[in-house]
Image (cartoon, helix red, strand yellow):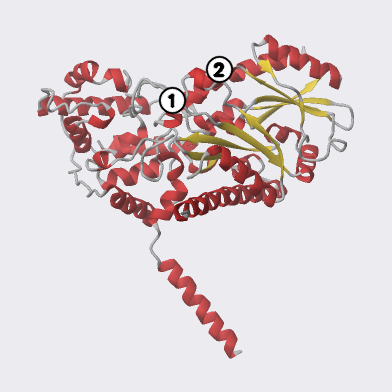
Amino acid sequence: MRHTNILIVMLLLLSATQALALPDGRELYIRNCNACHQFQGAGGIGLPLTAKKFRDYSDDYLFKTIRHGRPGRVMPAFMEMSDAQVRAIITFLRQQTKTQARIYATSRLSGDPARGRQLFQTHCVACHGTDGGGQGEGTGVTLSRKRAFLIMPPAISNPGFQAAASDRMIRQVISVGRPQSGMPAFAEQGLSERDIDALVAYVRQLGERAAKKPEVALDEPPSHVTESPYDFETTVANVKQAVVGANFRAFPDRFLEQGLTDEFSVNPRQIGIRFCNFNKLYDMLKIEPRLGVVLPCRITILERPDGQVLLVTPNLKVVAHWFNNDQLVELWDRMEETFTDIIDEVTL
Amino acid sequence: MRFRGWLLAGLLLIAGGARADHMLMARVPMKADIAVEYLKTSIEEHGYAVAHVQMCDSGMKGFGFKSDTYRVVFFGKIDEVRRIVAAHPEFSAYLPLKIAVVAERGETVLSAINPKTFDTYYPKDKAMRVQFGRWHNDIRSMFHDVDQAARAKAKTSKNAP
């Protein structure tokens, strides 16, 4: 009995110690950020996290960036982390980059957006795009591929950026630039403080415009199931013909269970017709390097015990949203139409 | 001004697609061709069979990519696949499970769809949700295994004469 009491007290003490322990920023960074930003902050799928940039960031900007992410621009919103955990990551990043947090006044600037618009057209549009959504395909510096920009220009109209960056931080970045990624220091390029305030005002307008097109909530299943009017063999032949007709290269067939059991036990009435268009694939990989998690394109054909033949395809519209990548969503809307055409042709 | 703040906050809430957990990802300090081998071992140690490894990188260089390794590892347990396809043929689109392996500057990025993403689509099917939870834990554990192997390997080569 006494031993039990001692054990209970010890367990309570242990759990209290764990609850009071400060979160480990390094561990949290490795678990949540390292895959995209790399441990030394060199970047990858995510943008590089360098000391030069961190000198201009406030901790509030970093906090809100982690919390809200960048909707539609790959970086997720880490809403499930506690405030203490987010702060621990920021502390770790400050140590890594050997930088101190910059503090900005939160009051808004009152620049002239009309003047800002003109300046934006002259100085910013080439990299940040007319709508401030960032030019070029994809994000970060991933896959070391050739690209138009050294580092993809951030989407400054993105709701995540708009919520995180204060007016005065935007002013600071415009003034000192980002020489390491090609953005000039505009204060040295002859822009006055008034000009820069005007640009900030226009960036805010771009944010409001971008904010007017919220993401549509998807209420669809993650896959489509279509009944084939034909028998299994005819359906398989029709699918192969249709994918080639849609300009894809068909790979050798694979049974769904192939490789999971011995060849004599595999169910030969469940087959995946896999196909690819390499031009399209590489265009998509530029936009979304994690695409492999759903590759290759496949139509699964299943014969049910009652003889019914089903065609199963992923719902690309739904899947695209899992990547938090607006460019992919746009591309896969068209790809979904191609899949629908193929299924229509097969079941005609 | 205050309205703008509320508008942004509201939109950020609507844009729920940006949730962190649709993807499971890890970066391991190891070359991709070796990471694939460690991953295959870990998959088998977790009781799954590696169905096959798909190469997606033929011709990548011709398209301007400098990365030369892009593999997709397919794996599963035959009993699970049979049970799920019988009850939920629509789920066959996502079977076998997959992990993408991408080389990035001497390191490797591992990615998979987080199986818990599918919880939303089976709100009343407890067995499926338990299954998704198990896959989620196993994939995380596999990533951990490869990471640990990479770190141990790096330590050994550092200590090598």
Q: Quadrant of residue A52?
A: top left
In the picture, measured across the screen, residue A172 lies left or right of residue B44, that is: left
Chain hosting mark 1: A
User: Mark 1 belongs to which amino acid?
Assistant: Arg
Q: For the residue carrying disc 1, how many other residues have a C-alpha within 10 Å: few (<14), some (14-19), or many (20+)? A: some
Q: Residue furthest top?
A: A245
| Spot occupied by residue A205 in the image (x, y as percentages of width and height) | 27, 25
- Left or right, A242 with respect to B64, comes to right
Residue B41: % across, % down: 65, 47
For this view, does B11 lie left or right of residue A246?
left
Mark 1 secondary-structure assignment = loop
In the rendered structure, find residue A220 and report the number of the disc placed on it. none
In the rendered image, the residue lying farthest to the front is B161
**B97 and B126: which one is in front?**
B97
Q: Mark 2 or mark 1: which comes first in sequence?
A: 1
The residue at 83%/39% (across/down) is A262
In the orientation shown, which residue stands out farthest toward the bottom?
Answer: A2
Category of crowding for the residue at label 2, using alpha-carbon neighbours closer than 10 angstroms: few (below 14), some (14–19), many (at least 20): few
Q: Chain of mark 2?
A: A
Seen in the picture, residue A13 relative to A143 is either above or below; the reply is below
Please state which of the two labelled residues, at mark 2 or mark 1, is closer to the viewer.
1
Say if mark 2 contacts mark 1, CB within 8 Å: no
Q: Tell me, for residue A280, which label it has, or none.
A: 2
List x then y, in percent, for residue A345: 73, 12
In which quadrant will I find the N terminus of chain A? bottom right
Residue tagged 1: A145
The x, y position of residue A175, in whole percent, is: 16, 31
Q: Who is closer to the viewer here, B23 or B9?
A: B23
